[in-house]
């Protein structure tokens, strides 16, 4: 009798794949894992994700100017302390071309060591420890817009030593450490145009900063005030309308340029200061920004 073939094996029942509900510890673990991935700057996964996901780096407005920065890392800035102008002169002399340094305060239109010392003591200027040193200054530039879209320009200045210095540039003032753009604008207008305006500018609305007019750029050139001293100017520029200014050419007086400085009267009196500013209106098209 022939044997019957064995019955085929019965298929084993497959277990049902039910998705396990996510527990709260799993959520915590996943969030912690993502934090580790994003916080690792050298992780290749992070680099890939950052190509598709971006976050604003600095949502703050431009108006706050922090302590003075160094726009040129090749010339490291050191916060030197010079107790008096003589100590500054002793530090500069071996680092400067002798003929250029000797012309400070002597050549018409230049300033002297007292001026630079006052700038340093007020935090308006920083010096890089190089030969020659590089002077870094944050400057507030205010393009005052008048009738027919004309721009107010300072044509020349009369200095305390009687020298007339040509300028041909908009209103400009060195910024103080930590000063906002808005604060610097009002201070600059007050110091250089206040003698013909009078009053409190913020309270009566004489000065109006035009929206979206702010720009910033860096210029490097040899300083005209300090021959032989390279300078790096960080220019913060806005446009503004100032009510009450004369329509024709006019002159303003600056009574005490270094009145708020911390130096002694002897140092201030030895510095070259500006006594009068001479202004005129020019066509905006002929005067580039």
Image: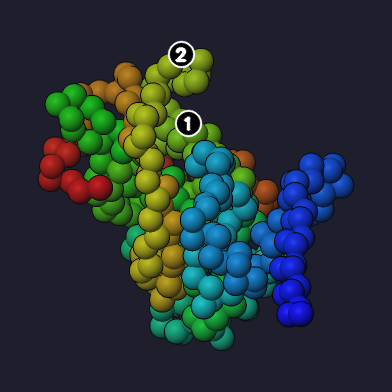
Q: Real-space Cα distance between discs 2 and 1?
A: 12 Å
Residue 47 visible within the image: yes
Question: Going from the N terminus, do you reach mark 2 or mark 1 first?
Answer: 1
Reply above or below: 225 against 149: below
Q: Is 9 on the left or on the right of 57, as rendered? A: right
Determine which of the numbered discs, if any, sits on residue 121 in the image.
Answer: none
Dot 1 corresponds to which residue?
A: 186
How far across and down, in percent of the image, does residue 272 sit?
Answer: 47, 55
Q: Is 157 on the left or on the right of 121, as rendered? A: left
How far across and down, in percent of the image, does residue 235 sit?
Answer: 41, 52
Reply above or below: 55 against 189: below
Residue 35 visible within the image: no
Dot 2 corresponds to which residue?
A: 204
Q: Quadrant of the N terminus?
A: bottom right
Q: Residue at x 42, y 47 (%)?
A: 236
Mark 2: give few (<14), some (14-19) or many (20+) Cα within 10 Å: few
Q: Is 83 on the left or on the right of 62, as rendered? A: right
Q: Report which quarter residue 114 is drawn in.
A: bottom right
Q: Residue at x 14, y 38 (%)?
A: 283
Reply above or below: 96 against 128: below
Where disc 1 sits, the SS reads helix
Q: Is 9 on the left or on the right of 178, as rendered? A: right
- Residue furthest top in the image: 204
Identify which residue, 267 or 277, lies in the foreground: 277
How far across and down, in percent of the image, does residue 257 sit?
Answer: 51, 43
């Amino acid at each position: 009798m022939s044997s019957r073939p064995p019955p085929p094996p019965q298929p084993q029942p497959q277990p049902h794949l039910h998705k396990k509900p996510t527990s709260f510890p799993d959520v915590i673990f996943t969030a912690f894992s993502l934090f580790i991935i994003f916080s690792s700057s050298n992780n290749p996964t992070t680099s890939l994700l950052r190509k598709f996901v971006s976050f604003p780096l600095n949502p703050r407005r431009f108006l706050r100017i922090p302590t003075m920065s160094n726009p040129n890392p090749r010339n490291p800035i050191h916060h030197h302390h010079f107790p008096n102008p003589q100590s500054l002169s002793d530090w500069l002399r071996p680092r400067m071309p002798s003929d250029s340094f000797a012309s400070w305060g002597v050549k018409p239109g230049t300033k002297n060591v007292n001026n630079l010392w006052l700038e340093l003591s007020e935090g308006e200027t920083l010096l890089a420890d190089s030969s020659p040193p590089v002077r870094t200054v944050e400057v507030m530039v205010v393009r005052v817009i008048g009738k027919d879209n004309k721009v107010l320009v300072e044509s020349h200045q009369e200095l305390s030593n009687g020298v007339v210095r040509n300028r041909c540039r908009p209103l400009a003032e060195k910024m103080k450490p930590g000063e906002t753009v808005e604060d610097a604008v009002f201070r600059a207008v007050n110091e250089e145009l206040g003698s013909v305006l009078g009053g409190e500018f913020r309270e009566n609305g004489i000065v109006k900063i035009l929206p979206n007019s702010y720009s910033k750029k860096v210029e490097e050139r040899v300083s005209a005030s300090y021959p032989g001293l390279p300078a790096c100017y960080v220019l913060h520029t806005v446009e503004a309308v100032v009510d009450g200014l004369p329509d024709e050419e006019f002159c303003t007086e600056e009574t005490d340029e270094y009145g708020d400085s911390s130096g002694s009267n002897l140092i201030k009196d030895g510095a070259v200061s500006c006594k009068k500013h001479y202004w005129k209106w020019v066509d905006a098209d002929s005067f580039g920004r």
